[in-house]
Amino acid sequence: MAKTAVPGGVVHELPDDLRTALTADTSALEAWLDITELARNEFICWVESAKQDKTRQRRIRRTVEELNDGMRRPCCWPGCSHRERTGR
């Protein structure tokens, strides 16, 4: 079975479990497609930084909920540590 084409982020590829959750919710998927690559990167990094599987699953659920609520970045997340920081 082919994966549904859903874009990932700038640094991070979209993990299969997050792709599955997004494709199961039309509104969340539409919101995902409407945000920038950098914003998608933040959600992916937030999900992937979870140390326990139950935390990861909770973050995937929250990603779908937050996208449905119109949020464009993960709530209470300082940002992806993998992106380049500028000195400005």
Image (cartoon, rainbow, N blue to C red):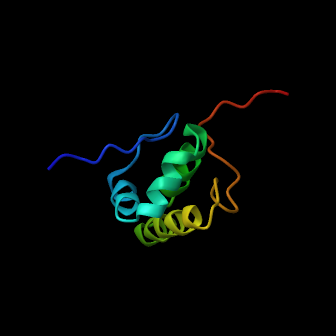
User: Outermost residue, right direction?
Assistant: 88
**Count of number-bearing discs:** 0
Vertical placement of residue 43 versus 9, above or below? below
Quarter of image, res 13: top left
Residue 46 visible in this rendered orientation of the protein: yes
Vertical placement of residue 5 versus 29, above or below? above
Tell me the quadrant of the picture where the C terminus can be found. Answer: top right
Quarter of image, res 22: bottom left
Quarter of image, res 65: bottom right
| Residue at position x 55%, y 66% in the image | 68
User: Outermost residue, left direction?
Assistant: 1
| Residue at position x 58%, y 46% in the image | 35
Residue 51 visible in this rendered orientation of the protein: no
x and y percent of residue 45 in the render? 53, 49
Vertical placement of residue 66 versus 18, above or below? below
Vertical placement of residue 13 versus 48, above or below? above
x and y percent of residue 62 in the render? 54, 68
Most foreground residue, 29 or 1: 29
x and y percent of residue 72 in the render? 63, 53
